[in-house]
Amino acid sequence: MNRQKVVLNAAAIVVAVVTLLPIFFMLSTSLKPAGEIFSLTPRLLPSHPTWSNYGAVISGSAAGRPYWDFLRNSLAVTVIAVVASSLIAMLASIAVARFRFRFRTAYLIMLLIVQMLPQQALVIALYLDFRAVNMLDSLAGLTILYTAFALPVTIFMLRNFVAAVPRQLEEAAAIDGASPPRVFWHVLLPLVAPGMVTTSVFAFISTWNEFVFALAFLGTDQSKYTLPVYVTYFFGQHSASWGPIMAASTLFTIPVMIFFLIVQRRLRDGMIAGAVKG
């Protein structure tokens, strides 16, 4: 038994090192001056730490616009897309899990098929569609697009959480005189909330990191660019400013970490959900 624990702990340490090494390398490089980054004798830790790379990113000198403009755009698009996709997916998952209707199975199969398609294969077709309705160069159009991309996986995952809630709880609340909206808000939603948090994490990450559609659909309007597009300003035609790139990548991960810290307890509950409290 002790030998098994040693093996498992050693494996866990190896996984942790492999996982954390790129993050450590990113942080270390973001604090190095250019001379150390391109040195023929690289060091894990910076010999002369500097905050100049972060200053270059936050000042927005490479793009001609402050970093906070790009951060605001990313936060607005991501938060709205996550909230909208979670609410729509919640209603759709209730319909799929609780009701029997024609083409229900075909609808579930379509959700799986849509997830198998690479999003980048849809760039040209969606670009033409959004241009036809004058939704290009618009954060609203990009938000609608991200919401649609998040729906298949959120609906399919939330369906399992809704199906795990016994119908008897809703029926008992209805017998006690609760209206359908009251049953939804006070019985079903609290029990499915961990599942909504779990699916919102996937929606948040995919939306926050998306680059191709943001670059293609926002065109040349720099005032509406998101953070993934802003990072490309530090790539030149024949060179790259690796210090600012790593600093921008570090700042890029902070909102994701904050989001995880906020939802971590609910996320843990959602991962082991299936059981009903109360």
Image (tube, helix red, strand yellow):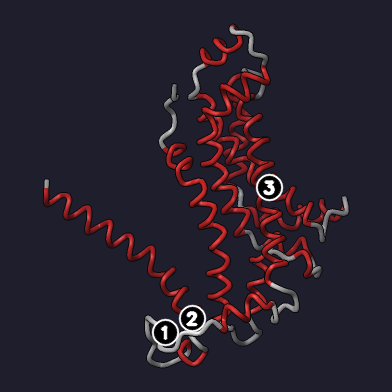
Tell me which label, 1 or 2, sits earlier in the chain. 2
Instruction: Judge depth for marks 3 and 2 and give the one in front.
Output: 2
User: Which residue does the numbered mark 1 point to in the structure image?
Assistant: 46
- Checking the image for residue 31, the label placed there is 2
Tell me which label, 3 or 2, sits earlier in the chain. 2
The image quadrant that residue 6 belongs to is bottom left
- Residue 198 placement (x, y as % from top left): 51, 41
Tag 3 near tag 1, CB within 8 Å: no
**Residue in the foreground of this view, choosing between 250 and 139:** 250
| Circle 2 Cα neighbour tier, 10 Å, few/some/many (<14 / 14–19 / ≥20) | many
- Checking the image for residue 81, the label placed there is 3
Vertically, is 103 above or below 260? above
* Mark 2: amino acid: Leu
* Mark 3: amino acid: Ala
The quadrant of the rendering that contains the C terminus is top left
For image coordinates 64% across by 13% down, the residue present is: 178
- Residue 72 placement (x, y as % from top left): 70, 61
* Mark 1: amino acid: Pro
